Amino acid sequence: MIKSKQAVIDVQADTISVAKRAANWLVEHLQKSSVDKFALCLSGGQTPQLLYKTLAQPEFSKQIPWSKVHLFWGDERFVSKSNDLSNYKMVKTALLDHISIPESNIHPVNTELADVYQAASAYEKELQNYYGNKILVPHSYLFDVTLLGVGGDGHTASLFPGSDVLKEQNAWVKAVVGVKKEDRITLTVPVLESSKAVAFLATGAEKSPIIKQVLSGDGDLPAARIKPEGNLYWFLDQTAYLSGSNSK
C-alpha cells in the first residue's frame, strides 16, 4: 500500500486480487460503522462488477449486515432496467440476486420516467430525502463509501472531459445528453465528494496512461477532480499502476 498526499494507493498482483482486497476493505468499513444506516454509492464498469461478484460470495456476504446497507448509483444510462447497458441490471445480476437485502434499501435511478431530465430530477429528490436536507453540509456525508471507475478518457461516473456538468455546483444530479449514444444520468462532483471514503477501482495495462495523468492531478480529467471530504483510495493491479507509479 502506497500513501501519497492525495490518496492511498493499493496495488495488487491481478484483477481478482484487486476485487478481493477491495471487498475486504469495504467489509472493514461496514463493520467499523456504528450507525444504523450505511450508504454505498455504486459504479458501473468491469472492475467494479468483479467486486460485486466477490461481495456476493458467502465468505464476504455473510459478514455484511445488508439490512443497514443502502445502495445508490453514481450514474446510469437512460435505458430500461432489463437492458444489458443498465448499470442497475449489472449490479442486480452480479450482487443483488445473490444476497438478502431489503427492497427499500435499493435506490436505483428511475429510468421509466418520460425523459432523462425527469429521471435526474427524481433521483436528486430521492438522494435529498435520504440525506434529510436539500443542501450538502460539510462533514455531514451523504455516502459512507463511493465506488468509482475511470475510463480511458479520464471520465468517471458520467462526468466526461469538457462537459458543462463538471462545473455544476448546485444540482445534485444532472442529465447528460448528446455526449454518448445513450442519454445518461449522473451525480455531480460535489455529491460524489460528499463521502466518508471514495475508492477508485481500475485494472489493466490500457488504464495505466490515464491513471498516471489522474494521479498527477491533471485538472482537465474528471476523475482527477474528485476530492472527497473524507479519504481517497485507489485499488489497482500492477499493470494499471506501472506508469502511474511515476506520478508519486
Image (cartoon, rainbow, N blue to C red):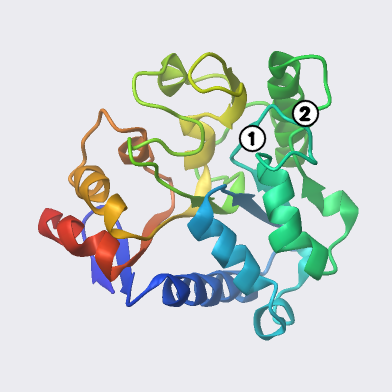
Reply above or below: 168 against 72: above
The residue located at (82%, 15%) in the rendering is 114
Measuring from the top left, give residue 34's x and y in whole percent: 67, 69
Q: Are marks 1 and 2 in contact (CB under 8 Å)?
A: yes
> What is the quadrant of residue 15 in the picture?
bottom left
Measuring from the top left, give residue 199's x and y in whole percent: 45, 56
Reply above or below: 4 against 75: below
Q: Residue furthest left?
A: 246
How far apart are the two marked residues, 1 and 2, measured between alpha carbons?
A: 8 Å
Q: Identify the disc placed on residue 76.
A: 1
Q: Is residue 70 visible?
A: no
The residue located at (44%, 39%) in the rendering is 156
Q: How many neighbours does mark 1 have within 10 angstroms: few (below 14), some (14-19), or many (20 or more)?
A: many
> What is the quadrant of residue 31 in the picture?
bottom right
* 152 left or right of 88 in image: left
Measuring from the top left, give residue 38's x and y in whole percent: 69, 59
Measuring from the top left, give residue 116's x and y in whole percent: 70, 18
Q: Identify the disc placed on residue 130.
A: none
Q: Secondary structure at mark 2?
A: loop
Amino acid carrying label 2: it is Thr
Residue under label 2, please give it: 111
